[in-house]
Image (cartoon, grey):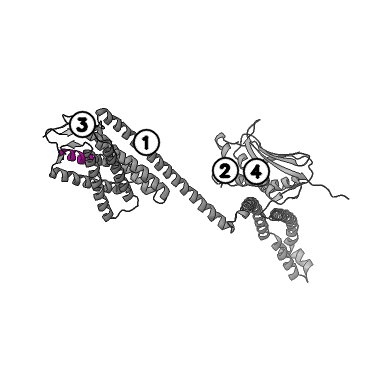
């Protein structure tokens, strides 16, 4: 019997490729399973994975065979070698097909592993047949059966490991996969070299494939090894990238769904909306308008609350003065005089009580006059506070209307600015903010006064907030209005400028984003709704730091049409 020997460098290369192929197989199985809901992508990965995985397993076997040499010229018939490659690809496709579903029944796992083991054995012995030995190779029955059993057991282990690794979501998953690939790689190599050990070559054997100039040589083994490693590496990289992008897309889809659910819930609380595309724009404008009106109402309620504090103080003082009034002494004096009406003269002259009555009334008179003056003053203050509340509420009611679309009407811009300042007046007065009005004489314009007021109230309220922390300089707010008249359309520009704390550079790009705020009590919707309203009016809203000093400058620019007086 002819005895062969091995090139151990090529043996090591074959085992290494078996491990890499096993690792790639584990990764590809996950790709196929994770795309189970997308049949087109799942079949694409199954096909790609079968080719790459089959090429890897076949390369291990082919290099392992090239590592074996006999003391005769050796080569391999290329059609049979290609057939063994096809068998490897089919076996790999079978494995990935079994693992495509999230759950694999035990019966399917056992049947699939058996078919895989038989397929791997068929690949191996087809490759051995490609040597075309004469006389034919004789196989030791025990080792032959052992090699087939090893192939089946290796297939069972491979499928079980893939299923087990699905449950491993820890940071050690990569190490677990690498360890499993090593076990699988050695199992596949064990089958191959057991099968090679089963082969017995008769004395005087001749390799007919060598005479037909078949495939062979260490150089070919290295080329096959490099190509197989490259294919497996590229496939593994693509699989990893696909998994990364799939995970990122899943997270993005989840975030978008959460955001959508939150937005839907918020919209449902405010008003019922429909999904027709024809009404989407009007619904957005309506939401922005309502948000703006809510902002105005919030300022109005805040101002009313502060004025109610003054009302409460005035009412308390009036009540206290009435309870402590000396009027009761007058009543007692009158009652005493009525009792002695018949002898009032002698009573006032001779009676001790009567003689003290006149000095008492003389002293009481100026006290009652002072009390009356104080009560009159407090009553006037109370009436002023009540009138102030009525004015604020009336102002809010005058702007409470407005439909879902932009409605242009005749607007006195300067009066509109005064209304916005008045809504914020109490807070600015309390914080000692001086207001400079640079209002030129501007003709009435056609504007949506509700949306414009919404924007102005937000801007002035923000300026008020920005000025509150300032202590080292007088607080100042400047409101500037300019109108650039055009032939067909004019441009209205309203600037709200403060000398407050300014805007941090890193926040400039986020000023108008929904939810962005730098205040602990802020909700991040004021400037966002203002920007939406400006866009609905075909205008712009911009914010920046002052160039000539501290503070910020917000500029609202709107297209506006002049009101043309009707001909007499």
- Quadrant for the N terminus in the image: top left
**Which is nearer the N-term, disc 1 or disc 3?**
3
Mark 1 vs mark 3, foreground winner is: 3
The answer to the question of whether label 2 and label 1 lie on touching residues, with beta carbons closer than 8 A, is no
| Residue at 33%, 40% in the rendered image | 52
User: Which residue carries the number 1 mark?
Assistant: 234
- Magenta stretch in the rendered image: 187-197
Q: Residues within 10 Å of mark 1 (few under 14, many from 20)?
A: few
User: Which residue carries the number 2 mark?
Assistant: 513
* Residue 282 in the figure: left or right of residue 195: right
Q: Position of residue 134 (x, y in %)?
A: 17, 36
| Residue at 72%, 68% in the rendered image | 335
The answer to the question of whether label 2 and label 3 lie on touching residues, with beta carbons closer than 8 A, is no
Mark 4 vs mark 2, foreground winner is: 2
Q: Residues within 10 Å of mark 3 (few under 14, many from 20)?
A: many
Q: Is residue 189 magenta?
A: yes
What is the CA distance from the residue labelled 1 to the residue labelled 4? 57 Å
What is the CA distance from the residue labelled 4 to the residue labelled 2? 15 Å
**Which is nearer the N-term, disc 2 or disc 3?**
3
The answer to the question of whether label 1 and label 4 lie on touching residues, with beta carbons closer than 8 A, is no
Q: Position of residue 272 (x, y in %)?
A: 58, 59
What's the magenta bit mostly, secondary-structure-wise?
Answer: helix
Of residues 342 and 299, which is closer to you in this image? 299
User: Which residue carries the number 4 mark?
Assistant: 459
**Mark 4 falls on what kind of element?**
helix
The answer to the question of whether label 4 and label 2 lie on touching residues, with beta carbons closer than 8 A, is no
**Mark 2 falls on what kind of element?**
loop
The numbered disc on residue 74 is: 3
């Amino acid at each position: 019997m002819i005895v062969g020997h091995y090139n151990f460098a090529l043996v090591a290369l074959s085992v290494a490729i078996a491990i890499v192929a096993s690792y790639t197989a584990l990764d590809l199985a996950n790709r196929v399973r994770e795309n189970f809901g997308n049949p087109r992508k799942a079949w694409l990965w199954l096909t790609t994975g079968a080719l790459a995985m089959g090429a890897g397993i076949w390369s291990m076997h082919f290099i392992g065979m090239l590592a074996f040499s006999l003391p005769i010229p050796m080569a391999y018939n290329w059609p049979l070698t290609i057939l063994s490659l096809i068998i490897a690809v089919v076996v790999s496709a079978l494995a990935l097909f079994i693992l495509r579903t999230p759950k694999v029944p035990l019966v399917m796992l056992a049947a699939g592993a058996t078919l895989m083991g038989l397929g791997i054995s068929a690949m191996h012995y087809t490759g051995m047949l490609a040597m075309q030995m004469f006389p034919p190779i004789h196989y030791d029955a025990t080792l032959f059966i052992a090699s087939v059993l090893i192939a089946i057991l290796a297939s069972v282990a491979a499928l079980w490991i893939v299923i087990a690794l699905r449950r491993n979501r820890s940071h050690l998953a990569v190490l677990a996969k690498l360890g499993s690939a090593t076990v699988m790689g050695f199992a596949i190599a064990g089958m191959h070299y057991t099968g090679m050990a089963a082969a017995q070559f008769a004395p005087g054997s001749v390799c007919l494939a060598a005479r037909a100039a078949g495939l062979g040589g260490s150089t070919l083994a290295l080329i096959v090894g490099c190509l197989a490693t490259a294919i497996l590496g590229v496939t593994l990289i693509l699989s990893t990238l696909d998994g990364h992008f799939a995970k990122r897309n899943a997270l993005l889809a989840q975030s978008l769904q959460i955001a959508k659910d939150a937005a839907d819930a918020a919209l449902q609380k405010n008003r019922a909306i429909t999904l027709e595309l024809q009404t989407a724009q009007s619904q957005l404008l309506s939401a922005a308008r309502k948000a703006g009106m809510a902002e105005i109402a919030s300022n109005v309620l805040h101002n009313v609350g502060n004025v109610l504090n003054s009302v409460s103080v005035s009412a308390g003082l009036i009540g206290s003065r009435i309870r402590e009034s000396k009027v009761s002494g007058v009543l007692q004096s009158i009652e005493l005089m009525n009792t002695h009406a018949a002898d009032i003269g002698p009573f006032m002259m001779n009676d001790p009580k009567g003689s003290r009555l006149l000095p008492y009334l003389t002293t009481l008179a100026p006290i009652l006059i002072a009390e009356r003056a104080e009560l009159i003053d407090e009553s006037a203050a109370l009436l002023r506070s009540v009138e102030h509340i009525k004015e604020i509420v009336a102002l809010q009611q005058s702007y409470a209307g407005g439909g879902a679309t932009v409605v242009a009407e005749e607007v006195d811009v300067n009066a509109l600015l005064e209304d916005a300042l008045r809504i914020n007046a109490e807070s600015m007065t309390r914080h000692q903010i001086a207001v400079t009005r640079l209002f030129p004489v501007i003709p009435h314009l056609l504007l949506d006064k509700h949306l414009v007021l919404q924007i102005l109230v937000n801007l002035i309220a923000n300026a008020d907030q920005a000025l509150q922390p300032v202590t080292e300089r007088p607080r100042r707010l400047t409101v500037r209005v300019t109108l650039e008249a055009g032939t067909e359309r004019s441009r209205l520009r309203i600037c709200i400028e403060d000398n407050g704390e300014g805007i941090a550079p890193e926040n400039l790009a986020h000023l108008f984003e929904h939810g962005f705020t730098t205040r602990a009590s802020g909700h991040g919707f004021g400037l966002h709704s203002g920007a939406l309203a400006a866009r609905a009016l075909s205008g712009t809203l911009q914010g920046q730091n002052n160039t000539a000093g501290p503070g910020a400058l917000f500029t609202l620019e709107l297209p506006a049409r002049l009101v043309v007086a009707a001909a007499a």
